[in-house]
Amino acid sequence: MKKKIFFKSAFIGIVALGMASCADDLNQNSIDPKSSNTYNEMELLAKQYATLGLTGQTGPAGKGDISNDEGESGFYRTTFNLEELCSDETVWAWQNDNDIPAITNIAWTSASDRVNWAYQRLAYDIQLYNFYLSETESQKDDSNVKLYRAEVRFLRALHYWYYLDLFRKAPFKTDYNPATLPEEKAGKDLYDWIDQELTEIEPELASIGSFNNSDNFGRADQGAAYMLHARLALNSSVYTDGQVKDYQKAIDYCDKVIGSGKYALSTETKNGWSGYKQLFMGDNDKNEQAMKEIIFPIRQDGVKTECYAASTYLVSSMAASGMPYLGTSNQWTCNFARYSCLQFFFNDPTKIKLATAELHDNYVKDYTAANGKAPGTSEADIIAEDKALGTSTADVVKLAGDDRALFYPGVGGGYRKLTTNQITGFLNGLSFAKWTNVYSDGSTPSDPTFSDTDVPLFRLAEAYLTRAEAEWRLNGSDAKAVADINVLRSRAHAPQVTSVDADLLIKEWGKEFYMEGRRRSDLIRFGLFTGNKYLWSFKGGVAKGASVDKHYNVYPIPAKDISNNPGLTQNAGY
């Protein structure tokens, strides 16, 4: 049934002022590209989801929701950066970029722009959701609207989870009233609210797996809520300072997901692409086996969702001109792998063969002698040379004995190092080859600039790893924990394990989910992010790594918000 929903004129000028109080950072633009206050209910629902992957109203740079630099203001990019750029997985090559050294070295302050951008995006989106819920309150008994409201409540709970994970507190509101400032909800109180909110909406959402199809891919059903609930529960001790240890709850929700029979791991090789690799390709919303693993994605389309903040960011930031299998003409040369990321897969990463000028020159000499002409420089030529030199991603995968070791050491884009004492550019480490805009079926992406690749925010592999870790935390290295780890290792064609410990688990999280926007959270749960128990390159601003204070386990509340809202308090150490 299609209906029209009529909204107050306030809808046109909605801003997050009533949520986070930093009006100077927010553009007061319409949250919908239409200039009418009459909306089809599905169009309005679509906007609630669109804010996960878009940043404004007119494409990549125009009428931005929040900042003047739309590329830096998106939901996924801002949260990804706070989870990954400070971790043992990646380095941002251009250290002269705004606030990048502080994030790289774990030395941020309450004045950090990148911290503020994430805080403001979460606030803006929550205010958007509160407005939707406020305006549909009178229709909440209608079966369609009841379902849509449950989906929007899920999105709001997801955003409050990000607040809890990054800041351990939130500027909290559940109603739309710009005249009132939010109150602070922190720690166990915020944890309990998210827990209860998910419990309430789960029966109202579409049944598990209902939206795991081409008609509704990207909408949240019970499977998405169960995964968020499991993630929340796995981190319960961290979020509540040890007051709650909901590991059995994490197991129970993973059981619901895995046991539903609605999802399956992507396992079958297709046109030379492994099942794992297909999860991060441009047609992962059309490839049926990739879709079966992806429980809740951020939808992306190179024509319909032009932006620099979701998968275009992932693909382009890890790309250099000349690298093969990119599927994009937009190469930014930004994120490269830290040495410690390679150590997830290799005890000795120096065994990886790197392309060098000498190897290239010898290849050119031999090729010319054999063919009577020099080799070309096309993508096919680069692929051929990497294959001949043994410097392709396929060679790295073979050496690792693990399909997930998607790194590129080849000739495309320049000659790389494994590590560096000074960050001077993109070639200071191996390149990531995980994210791409190439289609697994060989067809052409919709746009050479913007990515079609959907971002899997929740996928089935997380349920297996979450259940394995929760089982280990409750019962040690038992058969159940071992079995779940081995399910994922089997998919990756990696050797099976016979026991589970903390070191294996944190490495498995890294192997399976590197560069998916969660590493900091996992390191904190294992007590490895701060302190000196585990060091990696440039942790603490030192090339070989140094200890950092424990207050960096939590990001600061932006100083602007503290000054504008007397109800907010700063986190300890800032």
Image (spheres, rainbow, N blue to C red):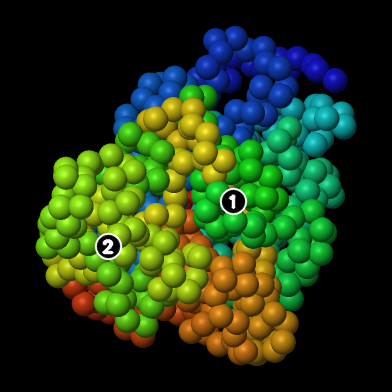
Disc 1 secondary structure class: loop
Q: Quadrant of residue 287?
A: top right
Q: What amino acid is labelled 1 in the image?
A: Lys
Residue behind mark 2: 389
Q: Position of residue 564 (x, y in %)?
A: 38, 42
Residue behind mark 1: 270
Between 54 and 454, which is closer to the camera in this rendering? 454
Disc 2 secondary structure class: helix
Between 449 and 188, which is closer to the camera in this rendering? 449
Q: Quadrant of residue 342?
A: bottom left
Q: For residue 130, say whether it is visible.
A: yes
| Mark toward the start of the polypeptide (1 vs 2) | 1
Q: Position of residue 262 (x, y in %)?
A: 79, 53
In the depicted structure, whether residue 60 falls above or below residue 393: above
Q: Position of residue 211 (x, y in %)?
A: 75, 41
Q: What amino acid is labelled 2 in the image?
A: Leu
Q: Quadrant of residue 363?
A: bottom left
